[in-house]
């Protein structure tokens, strides 16, 4: 049997939600803001931590959305490693809500839009959108395909909080679509041993809270 792999799942850095278009739009697949200045700094600190991993990830995968791509870029450049984009690592598809504002959704369902404004994860109720089993199957299939293609060496995936929950939830036997909120650029680590998956740690942001631990710039 080969040695266990480490799978690192990272949520993107803080995105720029200040414009009206992004502030008033649900977070589906067409919601694609860039990182703000804080998010760019988070990505820089993340890269400084990742380049000190021993051993280094041999494969890096990313969601196609801009905030995820901008998060992984500093590390990929510093490590000289190519990033492979997987479309199935994108946010959940929210069907008819993809191109609507909260105000437009409000016209059809006032209770749902208020819960959305409070960041409650009810995207699976969107007309024509993905349901939790479908979403978990999509995300799980993408991650497991990547692991099957590269069964040796550690792996890094940069995506979204809901994507991380979709993969980790079944490992822990949890039914909630969002059982925890990954912090921006948090590291979440899974041990891969054959068909077994084991959570090593979740929501580690030491590179943000104690950046001195990872050396000088």
Image (cartoon, grey):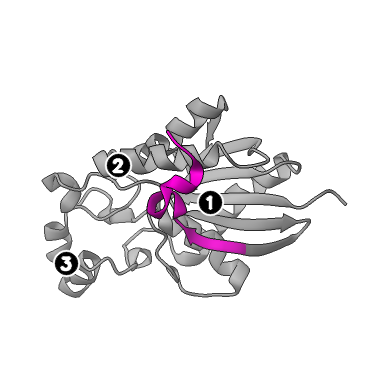
Residue occupied by mark 1: 9
Query: In terms of depth relative to the viewer, which is nearer, 74 or 196?
Result: 74
**Residue 106 location in percent, x, y?**
14, 65
Question: Residue 32: which disc?
Answer: 2
Does 208 appear in magenta?
Answer: yes
In magenta, the rendered stretch is 200-217
Looking at the rendered structure, the secondary structure element under dot 3 is loop
Give the side of residue 136 with respect to residue 146, left or right. left
Which badge, 2 or 1, is on the more N-terminal residue?
Answer: 1
The residue located at (18%, 61%) in the rendering is 105
Residue 214 tag number: none
In the figure, residue 152 lies in which quadrant?
top right
> Quick one: label 1, few (<14), some, or many (20+) residues within 10 Å?
many
Q: Nearer the viewer, residue 141 or 185?
A: 185
Give the CA separation, mark 2 to mark 1: 20 Å
The Cα atoms of the two marked residues, 3 and 2, are separated by 24 Å
Q: First in sequence: mark 1 or mark 3? A: 1
């Amino acid at each position: 049997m080969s040695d266990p792999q480490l799978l690192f799942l990272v949520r993107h850095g803080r995105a720029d939600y200040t414009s009206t278009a992004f502030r008033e739009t649900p977070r589906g697949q067409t919601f694609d803001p860039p990182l703000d200045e804080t998010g760019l700094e988070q990505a820089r600190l993340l890269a400084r931590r990742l380049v000190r991993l021993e051993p280094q990830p041999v494969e890096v995968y990313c969601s196609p959305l801009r905030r995820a791509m901008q998060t992984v870029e500093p590390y990929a450049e510093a490590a000289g490693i190519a990033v492979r984009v997987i479309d199935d690592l994108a946010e959940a598809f929210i069907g008819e809500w993809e191109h609507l504002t909260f105000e437009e959704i409000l016209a059809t369902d006032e209770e749902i839009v208020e819960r959305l404004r409070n960041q409650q994860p009810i995207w699976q109720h969107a007309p024509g959108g993905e349901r939790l089993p479908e979403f978990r199957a999509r995300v799980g299939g993408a991650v497991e395909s990547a692991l099957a293609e590269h069964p040796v060496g550690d792996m890094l995936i940069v995506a979204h909080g809901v994507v991380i929950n979709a993969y980790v939830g079944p490992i822990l036997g949890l039914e909630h679509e969002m059982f925890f909120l990954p912090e921006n650029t948090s590291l979440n680590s899974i041990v891969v041993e054959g068909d077994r998956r084991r959570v090593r740690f979740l929501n580690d942001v030491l590179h943000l809270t104690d950046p001195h631990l990872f050396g000088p710039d």
